Amino acid sequence: MKRSKEQAMPDQVRVCLVGAGRAGKVHAHSLVSHIPTGRLAAIVDPVSEALASTGDEFGIEARFESLEAALDWDQFDAVVITTPTFTHESLAVLAAQSGKHLLLEKPMALTLAECDRILAAVERGGVLLQLGFMRRFDPEFVAAFERIQAGEIGQPMIVKSLTHGPGLPPPWARDLRTSNGMLAEVNSHDWDCIRWLMSSNPQRVYAEVANFKGEARGVDTPDFYDNVLVNIRFESGGLGSISGVCPCEYGYDARVEIVGERGIMQIGEMQGQAVIVCTDREQGLVTPIYRTWPERFAWGYIREMEHFIQCIQTGAPPKVGGQDGRWAVAGVLAATKSFLEERPVALGEVLKGEEKPR
Ligand SMILES: NC(=O)c1ccc[n+]([C@@H]2O[C@H](COP(=O)([O-])OP(=O)(O)OC[C@H]3O[C@@H](n4cnc5c(N)ncnc54)[C@H](O)[C@@H]3O)[C@@H](O)[C@H]2O)c1
């Protein structure tokens, strides 16, 4: 059933989680433990073990093997899509045309044409679309953005953003054909953040990749890489870089440095605890660091879900939407073209023939 924007929402927004894997569990936790105005009403996953374990963990009885089956049941207002990237377009389009609001995990999709079909379905369905860029809700990132906007470091000139993640990604997430590789799977957050913090779109990119660990771990996926460095020029004239390492042996690391005309700002730290231990000479300084992304961005995930539920209840547009998702995909595609063709690539090249994101 198509739902118009004006239609009143119940006090509690009922959410169907589509994809009961790692990210799905993080969002399920936010809804069940932190957000009284939202209710996890149903779970969808074609893999029976995932459906059973996540359903049992969060006490959800309505379990479906497909989004179509959940839509036949129809006892929910919104979907949270946490499935592999190559499924995003079909699931998002189906949910939007059925009148369900969407929180869609990054990366928005594999191609800009897929992003555009999602945007068109969202427009036709009269529903909200929020992208899963939780750093926009992380207290440290939000404070940094506000202080840049207030002019504390002057006009931003250079931004350097890194994300290093532990663990070899699952096969679909390291294959360019099903995920666009690490630049999308790990660094989508950097693509979104640098554009947000610099208040400017990327204009030209140059990427180099390296594969240090794949062979030893039995990875024979074509064009697999586990290290990436991208240099970026922005439309504002500013410069930037994105660094990615995955698998990273020392933990989960996400930090940004912004150099402005009047100063410098750093977001994030390596320590997972405030206690620093210094022991014998051999060990030196030992500081515990974050091990996982759900730990590092715990409040970001909760605040992003709160925002999604609030937007549905008030009809306000989400702070991070489809055009932001589309720009992150454009950056990934330009940088992938850059390393494959061993040359700098202007964003205009990947945007050519497709409508330029606003
Ligand atoms: N925002 C973040 O920090 C963050 C972190 C991790 C993953 N993600 C994103 O979340 C998405 C999922 O990643 P993950 O690590 O949770 O993957 P995962 O492999 O752990 O889980 C994906 C789940 O989706 C299920 N699935 C596959 N096709 C489906 C379909 N058609 N309908 C319903 N369920 C289906 C799978 O069976 C699996 O249980 C990806 O887009 C990824 O980039 C985001």
Image (spheres, grey):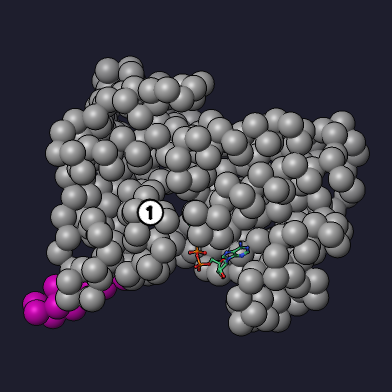
Residue at coordinates 26% horizontally, 38% vertically from top-left? 337
Q: Is mark 1 within 8 Å of ligand 1?
A: no
Quadrant in which the N terminus is drawn: top right
At label 1, the amino acid type is Arg
Q: Position of residue 33 (x, y in %)?
A: 70, 66
Magenta region, residue range? 275-289
Q: Residues within 10 Å of mark 1 (few under 14, many from 20)?
A: few
State yes or no: residue 284 in magenta. Answer: yes
Residue at coordinates 51% horizontally, 59% vertically from top-left? 84
Is 196 above or below relative to 174? above
Q: Is residue 136 left or right of residue 262?
A: right
Q: Is residue 283 left or right of residue 292?
A: left
Is 268 above or below relative to 144? below
Question: Can residue 181 be seen in this snapshot?
Answer: yes
Q: Which residue is mark 1?
A: 177
Quarter assignment of residue 195: top left
State yes or no: residue 276 in magenta. Answer: yes
